Amino acid sequence: MTETPEATVQATEYEVSILPEDDINRPLFVITVQYRGEGRWAVTRHGSCLGTDGQWEFGIKEYDRGDAWLDAHRFDLDTALRLAREAAPHVICNGHTALDAYRRTHPTP
């Protein structure tokens, strides 16, 4: 009888936002950090991908891009999470940033 290999578990996606998990606006302002293989992660939001230059560029499919583009839009996990955290307050939806949304729903006393 052939032995069954042990199942492996791997995290492949993180959500990054300045809005709390239970905030009704959170889904509109979430940035996703997704594993893309070979130790490389993409920082994505609504079909766009964050580059090393801090700019969002439409198109996240690896087969659509060359190696130079991928090198500018794929990161090790620590770098991807840092970039996502830095970008999180500035995500825009309907002309408002995530920080605007946070301040509207979580006013300081």
Image (cartoon, rainbow, N blue to C red):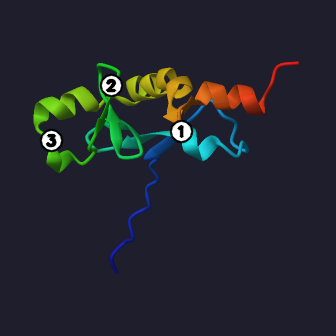
- How far apart are the alpha carbons under marks 1 and 3? 29 Å
Query: Looking at the image, is mark 1 or mark 3 earlier in the sequence?
Result: 3
Instruction: Classify mark 3: helix, strand or loop.
Output: loop
The N terminus lies in quadrant = bottom left
Q: Residues within 10 Å of mark 3 (few under 14, many from 20)?
A: few
Res. 58 mark: none
Quadrant of the rendered structure where residue 89 is? top right
Amino acid on which disc 2 is placed: Gln
Query: Looking at the image, is mark 1 or mark 2 earlier in the sequence?
Result: 2
- The residue lying toward the viewer, choosing from 43 and 58, is 58
The residue labelled by disc 2 is 55
Amino acid on which disc 1 is placed: Asn
Instruction: Classify mark 1: helix, strand or loop.
Output: loop
Is 108 displayed left or right of 25 in the figure? right
The residue labelled by disc 1 is 94
Is 26 displayed left or right of 82 in the figure? right
